[in-house]
Amino acid sequence: MYGLIFDSGKKVLTRKGQKYVFNATPTEEFWEAWRSDKGSVKNKGFSVSKKGDGYDSAWFVNRWEDVPDHVKKLDKEFNRLSKQEELTTEDVLLKPDNLNYLGYQKVGITYALQKKSCLIGDEMGLGKTIQAIGVMNNISDFKTAIIICPASLKVNWYREIKKWLINQDLTIEIITSKSLDQSFDKNISEVCI
């Protein structure tokens, strides 16, 4: 909208509660809309702010979004986890009935769910695959994933998805360079490895 390119944003506490705020450098298209109907632009969740002093100051466009209730709930749980208190995330994080996430995996999943994007960079063997699937399990409208990994890990990803993914109705497909065009033409797979 208005030709703006926003950063990845951050969560902030305001007088009206927690909000996501995203910043962008204003475009001429934005300034025209701002000057002609500031109220309408503000009603769409935009504001402007000036950062810096003197010659180093610059205007920024801020876009505000409410933090969803499920993220607020995860925030509380993440704060509890980070303080090493007694864990009760079993009630919060969705998982297969017969499996449990390890404590640090719960922290990783909770953290990732709070972000618009996240890179899980744990050491080898600590369960990054399970954490990624845990994130998929806890996104309410999860429908599609493309997993890019070395060929040697494709079977492992497939096996772990079959084991840990709650929605077993999703189609899971291992794609090779030869089957790539066919898979996307058919548009049948929800999880592509």
Image (tube, rainbow, N blue to C red):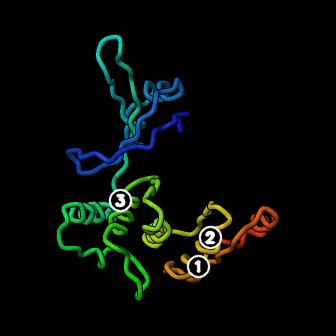
Is mark 2 in CB contact (under 8 Å) with mark 1?
no
Name the residue: 65% across, 67% down: 152
> Where in the figure is residue 191, as x and y percent of width and height?
62, 70
Q: Residue 142: image x %, image y %?
A: 52, 68
Q: Are marks 2 and 3 in contact (CB under 8 Å)?
A: no
Say what secondary structure mark 3 lies in: helix
Instruction: Identify which amino acid the numbered label 2 is placed on.
Output: Val
Q: Residue 83's mark?
A: none
Residue at left offset 33%, top offset 55%: 67
Label 1 environment density (alpha carbons within 10 Å; few <14, some 14–19, many ≥20):
few
Residue that carries the numbered disc 1 in the rendered image: 159
Q: Secondary structure at mark 1?
A: helix
Q: Is residue 31 left or right of residue 16?
A: right
Residue shown at 33% from the left, 28% from the top: 49
Q: Residue at x 31, y 63 (%)?
A: 69
Name the residue at the top extreme.
55
Quadrant of the drawing holding the C terminus: bottom right
Find disc 3 in the rendering and name its residue.
111
| Residue type at the position of mark 3 | Tyr
Residue 113 or residue 71, whichever sits in front: 113
The residue pinned by badge 2 equals: 191
Amino acid identity at mark 1: Arg
- In the displayed orientation, state which residue is furthest to the front: 124
Quadrant for residue 72, please give it: bottom left
Q: Residues within 10 Å of mark 2 (few under 14, many from 20)?
A: some
Residue 60 occupies which quadrant of the picture? top left
Tell me which numbered mark, 2 or 1, is placed earlier along the sequence: 1
How far separated are the C-alphas under marks 2 and 1? Answer: 13 Å
Can residue 21 be seen here? Answer: yes
Of the residues under marks 1 and 3, which one precedes in the sequence? 3
In the depicted view, which residue is nearer to us: 114 or 173? 173
